[in-house]
Amino acid sequence: MIKLKVVFILTFLCNLNLYGQSKTKAEDIFKMHLFLDKKNITRSDLEKNVIKNDSLFDSFKKNCSIKIDTLKMYSNIYLPIDGSFKFYVIRDIEYKNELSKVEMWFLKIDLNLDYKYVIAINESTGRSYCLSGFNNNDFFVFFSDISNAYRSFYFKKLKISNFLKNYKVENLDFECLYKSIKSDVIDKERFPCLKTPNDSFSIH
């Protein structure tokens, strides 16, 4: 009985450590995507243009702290990789005082209650996907990877209607993302899933 308790405790601590590592990895990946999503800026009140480079990214990683939550997923589509997908959303961002004025102008990330930053990570392959809040959306690549895995396992095509009906993640509207990709025009009013926290919204 004592040995069983010891094994249980060690297993629990091991899983807790792996979960912590997973969250840390997700934070680093989030920071990479947030930084890459930023555009170079020129402002009259800045001493120089602000452009993305290794030094600025190092400052971002060091002085920006993000808090993330894991989103719930519901799926009736069995895939060998299903358990490898994790979905994360940014809950809060904090900055240290070490940031200069130039760095703050460039690195500041806006948050919005309605339109959140969400990424998916396949923890088996290491691939990550921006699915909400970013200027570019990786839904097509995300669905393509799931479709390829589905075909490899079932030897048939995964219909988009089947995916949209049976694959759900909180805070994500996959149907909206799919229709926005099929559309020839980027219309954020028609497809609110494309909106970012930086967009301005009219209040009705």
Image (tube, helix red, strand yellow):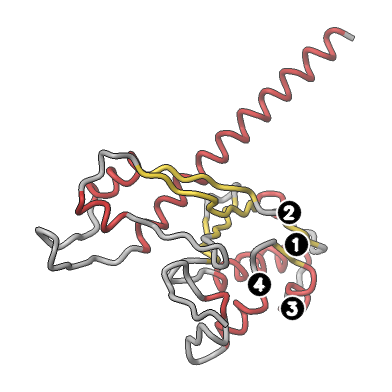
Residue designated by label 2: 80
> Viewer-nearest of labels 3 and 4?
4
Query: What's the amino acid at mark 3?
Result: Lys
Amino acid type of the residue that numbered disc 1 sits on in the rendered structure: Phe
Q: Distance between the residues labelled 3 and 4?
A: 17 Å
Q: Residues within 10 Å of mark 4 (few under 14, many from 20)?
A: some
Residue at (50%, 63%) from the top-left corner? 112
- Mark seen at residue 173: 4
Q: Closer to the camera, 164 or 72?
A: 72
Residue sitting farthest toward the right: 1
Choose mark 4 or mark 2, whichever is in front: 4
Residue type marked 2 = Pro
Q: Earlier in the sequence, mark 1 or mark 2?
A: 2
Secondary-structure class at tag 1: helix
Question: Residue 181: percent from the left, percent from the top?
Answer: 55, 82
Residue 33 coordinates in the image, percent (x, y): 42, 57
The picture places residue 190, in percent across and down from the top left corner, at 57, 87
The correct choice, above or below, for 112 with respect to 83 in the image is: below
Give the residue number, with chain letter if any, for mark 1. Answer: 153
Residue toward you, 50 or 139: 50
